[in-house]
Amino acid sequence: MIALTGSTGALGGLVVPMLLDLAPRLLVRNPERAPQLGLDVRPVSYDDATAATVALDGVDVLLMVSAGEAADRRDQHRTFIDSAARAGVRHVVYTSFAGASADATFTLGRDHHDAEAAIAESGMAFTFLRDNFYLDVLPLFADESGVIRGPAGSGRVAAVARADVADVAAAVLRDPAAHAGATYTLTGPEALSLADVATRAGTVLGRPLSFENETLDEAYAARRAGYPDAADWQLDAWVSTYTAIADGSCATVTSDVEALTGHPARTLEQALADGSP
Ligand SMILES: NC(=O)c1ccc[n+]([C@@H]2O[C@H](COP(=O)([O-])OP(=O)(O)OC[C@H]3O[C@@H](n4cnc5c(N)ncnc54)[C@H](OP(=O)(O)O)[C@@H]3O)[C@@H](O)[C@H]2O)c1
């Protein structure tokens, strides 16, 4: 029995149709928003150990899509991972982040390191899908006037199409034993500067986009002014998205997508156009 989380979101929503023949169970926060495909749908939120224990009963293999940004995300993840281990889940496939580590420049990469550690400590088999930033999300960083602003300088990012992450997840879930203990770093086919991303995404989207560098101080000041209620951890996450590009920590291109899916990693244009490989 396979269970999938995140099916109401972009990534998980792409995985579900690829695994319909395996009749996966869908674990969702709101069953009304689950894909209506005749599958077994169970309500669960990562921070609800009681619901998780019920929802995970009988599950062998679990796709755990990382939770949305939250101050207590590490605790949410740990509660769910602990519930999975108690419920007898044998193998967890977790969507992590490229370069996840305790001191990752991208501060949310530290949360992913914590989740990886919790899964490894749980004794369950695991496969970590360390996704780079999503290619199809980078253009959304542009403001209304089409400018992507941040302290990325001329650094490069080997961003990956979400559709490729979904293809990899489906391939791993079809044959989990073959991927037990593996950590894959999922990237696009090239490392792009944000100036490249702006120019090329603008062409596909038919909307001129550009990149303007900011200093660290300018980046924090702009975000504090735009989001006065944002907590420090959120500001750090937003700004470090760019500094992680500036310092090259997200620039390494791997061949893992092609090795796992049999097709080349999607380009920026493919990720933004029809999504086809
Ligand atoms: N690499 C990157 O560039 C990048 C960019 C954005 C996000 N991410 C990470 O990758 C994940 C998947 O991306 P996505 O594009 O599919 O995000 P998404 O569209 O926001 O979907 C997130 C999914 O996770 C579910 N979820 C979130 N928090 C949860 C919780 N506490 N308990 C149970 N379910 C929870 C959501 O359920 P609801 O529908 O109920 O909210 C949704 O189904 C994100 O959650 C985030 O951690 C990575």
Image: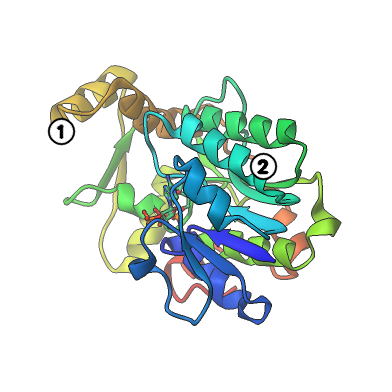
Where residue 107 sits in the image (x, y, percent)?
A: 47, 27
The residue pinned by badge 2 equals 86
Residue type pointed to by label 1: Gly
The residue shown at (31%, 47%) is 141
Where residue 64 sits in the image (x, y, percent)?
A: 58, 51
Q: Nearer the viewer, residue 42 or 260?
A: 42
The residue pinned by badge 1 equals 226
Bin the neighbour count of mark 1 within 10 Å (Cα to Cα): few under 14, some 14-19, many 20 and up.
few
Where residue 30 sits in the image (x, y, percent)?
A: 36, 61
The residue shown at (43%, 67%) is 272
Where residue 255 sits in the image (x, y, percent)?
A: 74, 54
Q: Residue 264 appears in which quarter of the rendering?
A: bottom right
Left or right? Give the position of 60 relative to 247: right
Q: Residue 2 appears in which quarter of the rendering?
A: bottom right
Q: Residue 176 appears in which quarter of the rendering?
A: bottom right
Left or right? Give the position of 267 relative to 85: left
Foreground disc of the pair 1, 2: 2
Q: Quick one: SS at disc 2?
A: helix
Q: CA distance from mark 1 to mark 2?
A: 43 Å
Bin the neighbour count of mark 2 within 10 Å (Cα to Cα): few under 14, some 14-19, many 20 and up.
some
Whether residue 160 is visible here, answered yes or no, is: no
Discs 1, 2 touching: Cβ within 8 Å:
no
**Quadrant where the C terminus is found in the figure:** bottom right
Give the mark, 1 or 2, whose residue is nearer the N terminus: 2
Left or right? Give the position of 155 relative to 84: left
The residue shown at (42%, 79%) is 36
Q: Is residue 100 above or below residue 126?
A: above
* Disc on res. 134: none
Residue type pointed to by label 2: Arg
Q: Is residue 255 above or below residue 12?
A: above
